[in-house]
Amino acid sequence: MTVIVTVKINDGIVLACDSAATFSNENGAPVKIYNNANKAFNLVKGLPIGTLACGAGGIGAASMSTITKDLRRRLSGDDKDHLDWKLPDDYTMEFVAGRVRQFLFEELYLTEYGNTPPAGFSLAYKVAGYSAGAALPELWDIRIVGDKCPDPILLRAADVCGCNWDGELDALCRLILGVGIKFKDVLLEEGVPPEVVDEAVEKVRNRLGAPVVVEAMPIQDAIELATFMVQTTIGFMRFNFGAETVGGPIEVAVITKHEGFKWVNRKLFFPESLNP
C-alpha cells in the first residue's frame, strides 16, 4: 500500500506521497516491500498538471512510472503515432482526466486483462492542476476496482479547498476526521440501528474533526501540512502491529498558477552532476 496526499488552497495545490511498494502473496499478505517507488509525476512538462498513483503498482508488466511517462509523451505531442492526443491550448482538467481514464482503462487495462482482472486489483489515480488560463486548481480522481472504472470524479472543484488522502487511510481518518475507518462497522456491531449509523458517523466527524486547511494559508504551510500528513501515516504504520506498508523517502510537489509544477522534495536514482 501507500499514502498519497493533496492539500488544496487558494494559492495552489500540494501533492505528497511516500515511496513504499508492497508485493503480496495470493492471500493478500505482504511478502516484500521496496521503498523507492515513484508515485508523483508532472503529467505534462511545462504545464501545471500533476498526478499521484496508489494501489496497483502497474498494469501488466509496466509500472505506473513507465505508464505515466508514456501518457506524458502523448499529451505533450511527442508520440508520432498519437498526435491527436496532444493537449489543445484551451484544455480543461476535466478533459485531461478523461484522457487519463481512456489511456489507463480502455487502452491498457482492458487490453491486458479484459474482464478478468487479477484478484483484488485496485488503482487510484489523482489528476491535479489548472485548466488553461484558470485562476484556481482542481483535483480529479480516476479509480479502477476489479473490472470497473467509472467516469472521473471531481474531488475538489476550483472553488473548494481542503485536504484529501488515499491508500492507507486509518491514521489520517482518526487524526483529521476524528474517527477511524472501522468506526461505522463498530457501531453496527454494537447494535446501533443501520438507518441512523451514517447520521451518527457524520455527527461525530462534525464534533471531532480537525479543520486543518485554511483557504488563505500560505503555500509553504500547505507544503508542511502535506508532508506532516505523510510522515504521520509512516509513523502510524511503523508502530502499529503489521507490515510497514508506508515508508521510504517522502516526495512533495507544488502546483501554482504562476510557477506551474515544481518539485519540493524528490528522490533521484542518478547523480545530478552526471546528468546536467
Image (tube, rainbow, N blue to C red):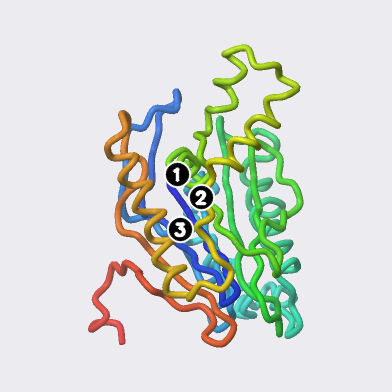
User: Which residue sits at x=65%, y=33%?
Assistant: 116
* Image coordinates for residue 212, horizontal then vertical, percent: 50, 57
Q: Position of residue 42 (x, y in %)?
A: 51, 72
Q: Residue furthest front?
A: 207
Label 2, on which residue?
A: 210
Tell me which label, 2 or 1, sits earlier in the chain: 1
Q: Which residue is mark 3?
A: 39
Q: Quadrant where the N terminus lies?
A: top left
Q: Is residue 74 left or right of residue 239?
A: right
Whether 199 is drawn above or below 271: the answer is: above
Q: State if disc 3 and disc 1 touch (CB < 8 Å).
A: no
Percent position of residue 13, x then y: 55, 70
Q: Height in image: 110 above or below 82?
A: above
Q: Mark 2 against mark 1, which lies toward the viewer?
A: 2
- Mark 1–mark 3 distance (CA, rounded to whole Å): 24 Å
Q: Is residue 186 above or below residue 22?
A: above
Quarter location, residue 206: top right
Residue at mark 3 to residue at mark 2: CA–CA distance: 27 Å
Marks 3 and 2, the one that precedes in the sequence: 3
Disc 2 and disc 1 in contact, CB within 8 angstroms = yes
Residue type highlighted by circle 1? Leu
Q: At 36% across and 45% down in the image, what residue appears? A: 246
Asked if disc 3 and disc 2 are in contact, CB closer than 8 Å, the reply is no
Mark 1 or 3, nearer chain start: 3
Q: Which residue is mark 1?
A: 175
Choose mark 1 or mark 3, whichever is in front: 1
Point 57% across, 69% down: residue:
9
Which secondary structure, mark 3?
loop
SS at badge 1? helix
